[in-house]
Image: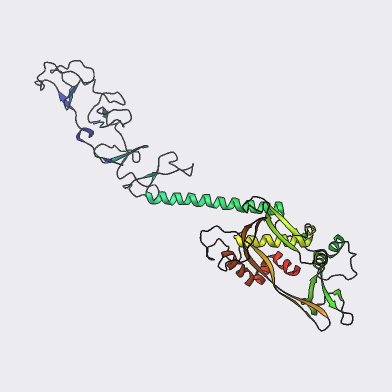
Amino acid sequence: MRWDAPSPTSALGPREAWGGQSDPWNHSEPRCKACGRGVDRRMSGAVKVGEEVFHASCFCCSRCRQPIEGRFFQSSDDDTPGASRGSYLCQSCQPRCAKCREGLAGRRFIKVPSGSYHEECFRCCGCDRVLEDGYFEAPHNNPFEADHGAARYHCARCHAIVLQRKEDIVEARSVAAQEFNKHSNTRKFQLAWREELAPDPNQALRDLHIVPPSVKPSNGHLVSLVLDSRTGAVGVAPLEAKNAKAAVSLPYLAVVLQVLRDTGREPRFSLDPKDSHDLGGPILVKRFEPSWLAGTVVGEVLFQADYALKQLCFGDLRLPGIPSVFDGELGGGQEAIASRQWFTMKRVGVSLSPDGAVIPHVELGVEARRLQPGPRGYEDAPQTDPNDPTVRQAAIVTARFPEIAAQVPVAGEIIQLA
């Protein structure tokens, strides 16, 4: 950027009439700079500018083509619209400041692609400071602005603010689009716990080909298990208020007993990549053990709880005091790692009430395990560093599991299932 100070030939000046005088060039007849014909030294009204001589009718404005009367402006470069270097302009056609529309002659000004400005008129449209140390073109964001279409400029500070604002808008739109997609996928793939998923005891028993019992559960699906001290048999009884801690979900109990009878172990679920060798693959599949759990209320609880745990881990589900593994609070460097988290039962047991009601005791938690490549794909490593971010996050989730269960419905359901 360069400030141009007007030279003597760039300023308005009086024209010098020449006539009836001796020939200063010692020529018998000087020639008109414009038409090339001779200029009679005795002719009044001839014009002399510096070393150049014109007929009065030939000394015309390069822009309007009218004879120049009075003061004039001589262009010092080729950037003046309608004029070339050394050409002459009348006062009406002289270059003007693009801001104040006053003439430029005799004052310091700056040239930019959109025009020329007086030094004091070339200001930032954001903070109104004179632009002395560079400038940036400013966009028009409002088509209804009074000066919409006119060139505008920013200083470096305001330009940085505008760029940051644009970045913030782009980021906000990206986050909003991601949230919209998440909500759309949640509805489309039914990724949230819904009221209609609440267990129906009779339907669950019918699905397992078990005749519905004569005992009607209270509170929708809750019963209590009662130990017959004489026979050692365990039976089902209506849940009494005094034995509220003995509440057991009849549908969950029926399915889990079926699993134990068929496989000898508890139900199991994981949400895994379709290609077990590619953790970044776009497709995830539900894996139930046994496979017939898919479509049962127990299978849905296992899936929904696993999905909610992943949301907590990745920060898609935010709860007070529980950071995601990406928040930076849990440590970890730039190393790319692969881990997964499991719901586990930390402590289990039963006790008996005085009237023989079986009271279950269970404490759920979460464990994280590093994944390592194996012959059949990624599998749990034997050990995981206790400082691994997923391990530390799992410990926080475990410590606050009762709080999570109170805020995330499916977490309460998996406690009932446990």
Q: Position of residue 249 (x, y in %)?
A: 80, 69
- Front-lying residue, 343 or 52: 343
Q: Is residue 320 something that shows in the picture?
A: no
Q: Position of residue 221 (x, y in %)?
A: 81, 68
Residue 37 placement, left or right of 377: left
Q: Position of residue 257 (x, y in %)?
A: 82, 67
Q: For the C terminus, give its image quadrant.
A: bottom right
Q: Position of residue 192 (x, y in %)?
A: 70, 58
- The answer to which image quadrant residue 28 occupies is top left
Q: For the N terminus, give its image quadrant.
A: top left
> How many numbered discs sit on the rendered protein?
0
- The answer to which image quadrant residue 102 occupies is top left
Residue 62 placement, left or right of 240: left
Residue 365 placement, left or right of 51: right
Residue 13 placement, left or right of 304: left
Q: Is residue 287 something that shows in the picture?
A: yes
Residue occupying the far bottom of the picture? 354
- Front-lying residue, 168 or 90: 168
Q: Residue 83, relative to residue 30: is it above or below? A: below
- The answer to which image quadrant residue 363 occupies is bottom right
- Front-lying residue, 77 or 215: 215
Q: Residue 133, relative to residue 318: is it above or below? A: above
Looking at the image, what colour scheme do you see? rainbow
